[in-house]
Amino acid sequence: LQCPPCERIHCSSRRALKLQCKGGVTTGVCGCCPVCAKTEGETCGGTWDYLGKCDEGLVCVFQDSAAAKPDAERKGICKAIEQLDAESCQPECTKEYCQANPSAICSASTSLQNKECQGSCQHTSCSSCLLLKRPSCSQTCAPSDSTCLQHFGKCVHNHLTAPHSPICHNNLQ
């Protein structure tokens, strides 16, 4: 299959709005035009996913006998992705756990920025978590002391723009 660039494929801009999908919207064979995503129990797969792509949270599962067939004949069924059991996740990335085990692996499943590559447990290293601290700017300035206020502002600015690691868990703030 050779698809032209998407800008050369005519997709109706109103087509996505007209779609009456049971699930979400994905793209067709060439990855350009909107089509309905397949929902749980519907057929999927085939060469270049010509039979359809599964909706978010679903995966195209092929029967064992399909493995021996060429891609064109590999027909699957959309099924829900199995969620990992909580027991298979490492301990939660909490302030107490990471202070006691700074080089341990922990589960940041309630992280501020989920990363697909870390799975549903969002495993990461405690050392990659950041404990936000107050700036050490101890000045108390009078409202009319512009020089003092300027120094205090620079101190806070320098603290906030210093390089930090990403925050893994809202308990670490």
Image (spheres, grey):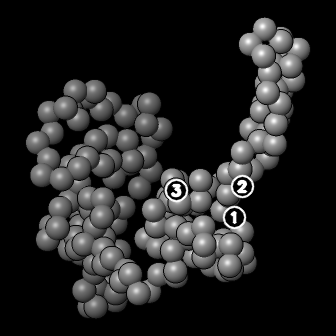
Q: Which residue is mark 1?
A: 128
Image-based side of 130 in relation to 58, left or right = right
**Which of the 4 quarters of the picture holds residue 140?**
top right
Query: Which label was assigned to residue 170?
Result: 3
Label 2 amino acid?
A: Ser
Q: Secondary structure at mark 1?
A: helix
Asked if residue 87 can be seen in this view, the reply is yes
Front one among 61 and 167: 167
Image-based side of 101 in relation to 25, left or right = right
Q: Secondary structure at mark 3?
A: helix
The image position of residue 137, as x and y in percent, is 82, 36
Dot placed on the residue nearer the N-terminal end, 3 or 2: 2
Image-based side of 60 in relation to 39, left or right = right
* Farthest residue, direction top: 144
Question: What is the spatial separation of the Cα atoms under label 3 and label 2, in whole angstroms?
Answer: 14 Å
The image position of residue 154, as x and y in percent, is 83, 26
Front one among 144 and 79: 144
Q: Which residue is mark 2?
A: 165
The residue carrying pointer 2 sits among few (fewer than 14), some (14 to 19) or many (20 or more) residues within 10 Å by Cα, namely few
Dot placed on the residue nearer the N-terminal end, 3 or 1: 1
Dot placed on the residue nearer the N-terminal end, 2 or 1: 1
The image position of residue 17, as x and y in percent, is 19, 32
Label 1 amino acid?
A: Ser
Above or below, comparing residue 18 to residue 171 in the picture: above
